[in-house]
């Protein structure tokens, strides 16, 4: 029998109560029993509830089995306390259960991207812009357009339109704060900030994901709509090119749930959504904003006619043009200038005369532009007091004139070439990168790999264009990147943007070729499941995560098929060499990064790119084989990274080019009986999901979708290229589903008999 005096102190100090994942282990099961090392039972979570409460602060009723939905989000977050995780992302993933949210972990980008938190993006934006100043946005709360949207039930959509740098993003940050402080407890608020310079948050799909995440965070029961989809497919449904279709349907169901509950949805910077996605996002907003008077929308963008034309379809909308409210904006900019000058004067110890000179110059030249003021003040922070008067004459009015002056300053500096390469490289990257990633991608920085402080100084020399937060480099504003691609194109991109993409492609392949090898995480066990993989403290993939995902995109944007033969040949030779020597290790790395689904998309993109080229038959054949390989073995490799070298090789045709190239990686002494065939079968992939015989199939008119009817009384809609199940429709048990007809005159697939349903394709 165990003595209370000996086990209770050890119980209280147990590491089990300090690990994040054990929070779910404690709360999720109905019964949790505790035992000593000797196997003696100490009790369960109910009999020991007082002791467990003392250790964790979790309420008694929760330990007794009360529904977690009775407790607020903040209360549940407090239960986490100081629990620790080995990986930053797990601090968030470990909480998913207590919020009743099912989310597949993705460890490729770190904690900040675990769910792509809109709250974190908002905080980052406010921090990089010097903080949110109430007096700079409070005017909008009394604005007649805002009041009409806020007070009148028939006005569901507010469109805030403005020129670059006029403060629309910070204005929306202020509106979000005010709504959070004033709305009823039953109301929900969700928001998303688009950013063109980051491919993770510049798509229509990313917008819906972000909005849904915050809604589910506040109302966990909404996650049932995600689970319903997840149960019919898997996580790939939410990750590939078809995610938009699925998310639109989920969002529609969520909004139906919220039709009697006040809800605010806010999207900033529609103009920073990628061009191909913008029309469908605008169409979605226009349609949904007219669906319910209880759900109110705010969107912001530059004053683009095409955005205005799309939003005209919204039934009840209000426009708020900052240009038409110039007097209010000017007053807000004046307040912002006052605050920035006060901060400068205190930090740089300006005398009264110098302070007045700075205040006067900013006031006369700001032209109602917050960004101009922020950029000038950032430069003045780096200027010695005795040079301030002279430096002020350096700053012309207007953003474009200021950017041009900064470009001239960079070009005349001793570090001109270094800054040029940093700026041009950063401009073509598809997401912000960390300082170590930047060093690996920009050749002149390689010599400074052991001197991170010097690299940070080089980034600061590009300060009017780049900023840094938490060791990650960002563009200060989309207008800064736009200026580089338009007004500074000839001066900075000496051989065009395609040449910079070519350099990023070459550097990416060099990084991968240098770092890729078998069993990069030293797992050793061939059956090591991906869910049990822990990222090493010294992660060998840390600087190669960007190249893993984007090397093919850079190859594509280097305009491979329009280059002169010698340049084209050098790139195709590099691709051929990489695939022949490193392809399997790349797949293993993608699996470790939980991005193998993206790898399928990338290798398909490469295959399509080669289809457009001449005299590349051998490489095209190799890429086609590589594509068949990853599509056929995706499930095994995705779940067990080291099966890349076992089942994936052994169960590939003997004539597979990839199998032949990596025969040295096959396990020795293993024979497959009967032996594998020589070639891949005609079957590209098997679509699994029905629970009975499939009775009929039909393709959509554009061949992009496939509908299948089954004896299990369901109809499934599949993406024809990826094999992902997009939608499952339940039929009536009283009628057999015997045929599906795709109408050539419609975007619908008709299901017989008795017009059972219409399937949108």
Image (tube, grey):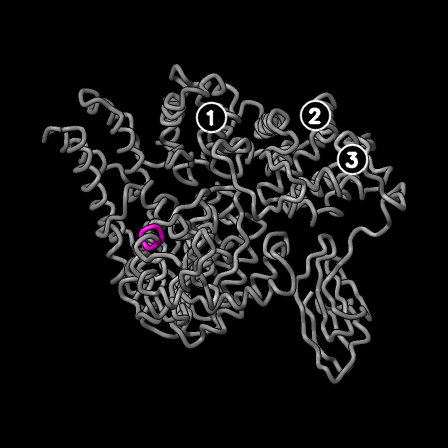
Q: Position of residue 421 (x, y in %)?
A: 49, 23
- What residue is disc 2 on? 574
Relative side of 243 to 150, left or right: right
Relative side of 506 to 542, left or right: right
Q: Which residues are magenta?
A: 7-11
**Vertical position of residue 571 compared to residue 65: above or below:** above
Identify the residue at horizontal 64%, vertical 29% (top origin): 517
- What residue is disc 3 on? 658
Looking at the image, how many numbered discs can be counted on the residues?
Answer: 3
Identify the element where label 3 is drawn: helix
| Depth check, front residue: 534 or 240 | 534
Q: Disc 3 and disc 2: Cα gap in Å? A: 17 Å
Circle 1 or circle 2, nearest the eye:
2
If you read the primary sequence from the N terminus, does the residue marked by circle 1 or circle 2 appear first? 1
| Depth check, front residue: 689 or 523 | 523
Q: Which mark is residue 422?
A: 1
Q: Disc 1 and disc 3: Cα gap in Å? A: 37 Å
Identify the element where label 2 is drawn: helix
| Depth check, front residue: 208 or 651 | 651
Q: Residues within 10 Å of mark 1 (few under 14, many from 20)?
A: many
Report if residue 743 lies within the magenta region. no
If you read the primary sequence from the N terminus, does the residue marked by circle 3 or circle 2 appear first? 2
């Amino acid at each position: 029998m165990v003595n209370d005096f000996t086990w209770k102190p050890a119980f209280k100090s147990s590491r089990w109560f300090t690990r994040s994942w054990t929070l779910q282990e404690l709360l999720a099961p109905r019964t949790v029993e505790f035992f000593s090392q000797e196997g003696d039972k100490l009790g369960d979570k109910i009999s020991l509830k007082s002791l467990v409460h003392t250790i964790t602060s979790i309420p008694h009723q929760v330990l007794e089995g009360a529904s977690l939905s009775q407790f607020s989000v903040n209360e549940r977050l407090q239960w986490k306390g100081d629990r620790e995780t080995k990986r930053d992302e797990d601090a968030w993933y470990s909480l998913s259960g207590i919020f009743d949210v099912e989310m597949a972990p993705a460890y490729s980008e770190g904690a900040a991207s675990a769910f792509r938190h809109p709250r974190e993006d908002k905080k980052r934006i406010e921090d990089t812009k010097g903080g949110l100043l109430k007096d700079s946005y409070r005017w909008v709360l009394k604005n007649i357009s805002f009041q009409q949207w806020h007070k009148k039930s028939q006005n569901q959509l507010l469109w805030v339109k403005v020129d670059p740098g006029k403060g629309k993003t910070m204005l929306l940050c202020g509106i979000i704060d005010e709504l959070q402080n004033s709305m009823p407890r039953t109301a929900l608020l969700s928001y998303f900030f688009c950013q063109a310079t980051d491919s993770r948050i510049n798509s229509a799909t990313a917008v819906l994901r972000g909005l849904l995440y915050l809604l589910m965070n506040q109302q966990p029961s909404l996650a049932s709509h995600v689970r319903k989809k997840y149960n019919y497919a898997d996580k790939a449904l939410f990750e590939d090119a078809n995610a938009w279709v699925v998310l639109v349907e989920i969002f529609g169901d969520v909004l139906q749930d919220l039709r009697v509950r006040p809800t605010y949805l806010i999207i900033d910077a529609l103009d920073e959504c990628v061009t191909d996605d913008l029309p469908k996002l605008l169409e979605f907003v226009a349609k949904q904003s007219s669906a319910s008077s209880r759900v109110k929308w705010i969107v912001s963008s530059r004053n683009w006619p095409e955005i205005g034309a799309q939003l005209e379809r919204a039934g009840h909308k209000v426009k708020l043009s900052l240009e038409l409210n110039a007097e209010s904006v000017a007053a807000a900019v004046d307040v912002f200038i006052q605050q920035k000058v006060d901060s400068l004067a205190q930090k740089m110890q300006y005398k009264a005369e110098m302070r007045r000179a700075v205040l006067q110059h900013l006031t006369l030249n700001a032209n109602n532009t917050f960004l101009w003021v922020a950029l000038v003040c950032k430069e003045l922070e780096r200027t010695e007091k005795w040079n301030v008067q002279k430096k002020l004459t350096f700053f012309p009015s207007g953003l474009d004139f200021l950017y041009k002056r900064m470009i001239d300053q960079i070009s005349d500096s001793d570090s001109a070439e270094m800054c040029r390469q940093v700026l041009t490289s950063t401009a073509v990257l598809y997401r912000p990168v960390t300082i170590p990633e930047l060093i690996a991608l920009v050749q002149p920085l390689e010599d400074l790999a052991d001197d991170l402080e010097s690299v940070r100084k080089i980034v600061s020399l590009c300060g009017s264009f780049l900023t840094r937060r938490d060791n990650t480099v960002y563009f200060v504003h989309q207008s800064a990147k736009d200026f580089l691609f338009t007004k500074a194109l000839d001066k900075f991109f000496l051989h065009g943007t395609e040449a910079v993409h070519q350099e990023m492609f070459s550097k990416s392949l060099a990084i991968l070729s240098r770092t890729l090898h078998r069993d990069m995480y030293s797992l050793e066990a061939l059956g090591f499941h991906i869910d049990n993989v822990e990222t090493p403290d010294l992660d060998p993939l840390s600087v190669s995560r960007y190249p893993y995902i984007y090397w093919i995109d850079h190859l594509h944007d280097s305009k491979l098929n329009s280059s002169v033969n010698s340049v084209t040949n050098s790139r195709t030779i590099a691709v051929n060499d990489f695939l022949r020597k490193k392809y399997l290790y790349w797949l293993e790395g993608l699996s470790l990064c939980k991005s193998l689904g993206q790898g399928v998309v990338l290798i398909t993109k490469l295959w399509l790119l080669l289809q457009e080229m001449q005299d590349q038959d051998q490489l095209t054949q190799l890429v086609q084989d590589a594509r068949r390989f990853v599509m056929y073995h995706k499930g095994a490799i995705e779940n067990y990274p080291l099966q890349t070298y076992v089942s994936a090789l052994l169960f590939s045709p003997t004539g597979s080019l990839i199998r032949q190239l990596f025969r040295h990686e096959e396990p020795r002494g293993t024979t497959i009986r009967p032996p594998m065939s020589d070639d891949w079968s005609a079957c590209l992939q098997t679509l699994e999901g029905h629970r009975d015989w499939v009775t009929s199939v039909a393709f959509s008119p554009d061949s992009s979708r496939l509908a299948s009817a089954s004896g299990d009384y369901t109809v499934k809609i599949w993406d024809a290229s990826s094999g992902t199940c997009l939608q499952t429709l339940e039929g009536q048990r009283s009628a057999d589903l015997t045929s599906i007809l795709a109408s050539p005159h419609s975007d619908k697939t008709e299901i017989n008999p008795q017009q059972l349903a219409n399937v949108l394709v």
